[in-house]
Amino acid sequence: MGAEVGGRPSVRPLGAFPDVLLITPHVHHDPRGFFLERWNEHVFAALGLPPFVQDNHSRSRRDTLRGLHFQAPPHAQGKLVSAMRGRVFDVAVDLRSASPMFGRWAGVTLDGDEPAWLWLPPGFAHGFLVLSDVADVLYKVTGGYAPQAEGGLAWDDPDLDIDWPLEPGAAPKLSAKDATWPPLAALRSPF
C-alpha cells in the first residue's frame, strides 16, 4: 500500500532561507475525506532530514503565542512542525551568528486541513500564533528537551519586527516564561 498511497512530497524553501523547508505531502482525497503518510522514515531521509528522537504535541487556544524558543548546543534541536487541527502562523528566526540572514525571520500559516510540515534545522528560534479557536501542533525533534540549554527571544522584539497576524488591539496569550525572554540585541548567539 505504501508505494501506491505514498508519493514524494513537494519541497520548497521558506522565504530566503534555503535550509528551512516547507514540505507538502501527497494527499489522497475521496468522498470519505483524505489519507496521507504523516511520517515515512525513508522519504524524509531522502530529503536529507536527520533522525528524530521525540514527538511533541501542544493544544492551544486562539491568540496563544508559543515562542520564540530554541535549545543551545550541544542540545540544539531541529524541528519538523505541522498543524494537526486548526491554523497557526509559524515563525523561524535565524540565530546562526555566521549566517548572512542572522536575526531575520520567515513565517507561514500551517493548517490542519491543508497538511504540510515546516522543517527548521538547529540554529533557529521557533514560535507560533494560534489563528483558529483551537490548534493542535505536532513537532518532531532531533534531540530531547534539555532545560539547561533552553533559550528564547522576545516575541515582540522591534529589531525582529515579526508581522504576527493579531487582530488590531489584541494581545497574545503568553506563558510567564515567554513574556520575559530577552530581545535579540541582548542575546549572545550560541550557534
Image: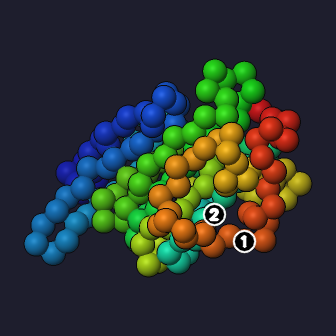
Q: Residue at x 44, y 49 (%)?
A: 108
Label disc, if present, on residue 175 of the rendered structure: 1
Q: Please tell me whether residue 115 is drawn above or below residue 99 in the rendered image.
A: below
The amino acid on which the numbered mark 1 sits, given as a three-letter code, is: Ser
Is 151 situated left or right of 61 in this image?
A: right
Q: Toward which corner of the image does residue 160 lie, by quadrant?
A: top right
Residue drawn at the location 51% of the way across and 40% of the way down: 106
| Amino acid carrying mark 2 in the image | Arg
Which residue is pictured at 19% across the width and 71% down the height? Answer: 33
53 lies above or below 113: above
- Is disc 2 placed on a helix, strand or loop? strand
Circles 2 and 1, Cβ within 8 Å, touching? The answer is yes
Vertical order, 69 against 106 (above or below): below
The N terminus - image quarter: bottom left
Mark 1: few, some, or many residues within 10 Å (few <14, many ≥20)?
A: few
Q: Give me the C-alpha separation between circle 2 and circle 1.
A: 8 Å
Q: Position of residue 83 (x, y in %)?
A: 44, 63
Q: Decide if residue 178 is on the left or right side of residue 94.
A: right
For residue 153, the mark is none
**Is 179 situated left or right of 139 in this image?**
right
**Where is residue 176, by image quadrant?**
bottom right
Q: Residue furthest right?
A: 148
Residue under pointer 2:
66
Inspect this view and state whether residue 42 appears: no
142 or 112: nearer the viewer: 112
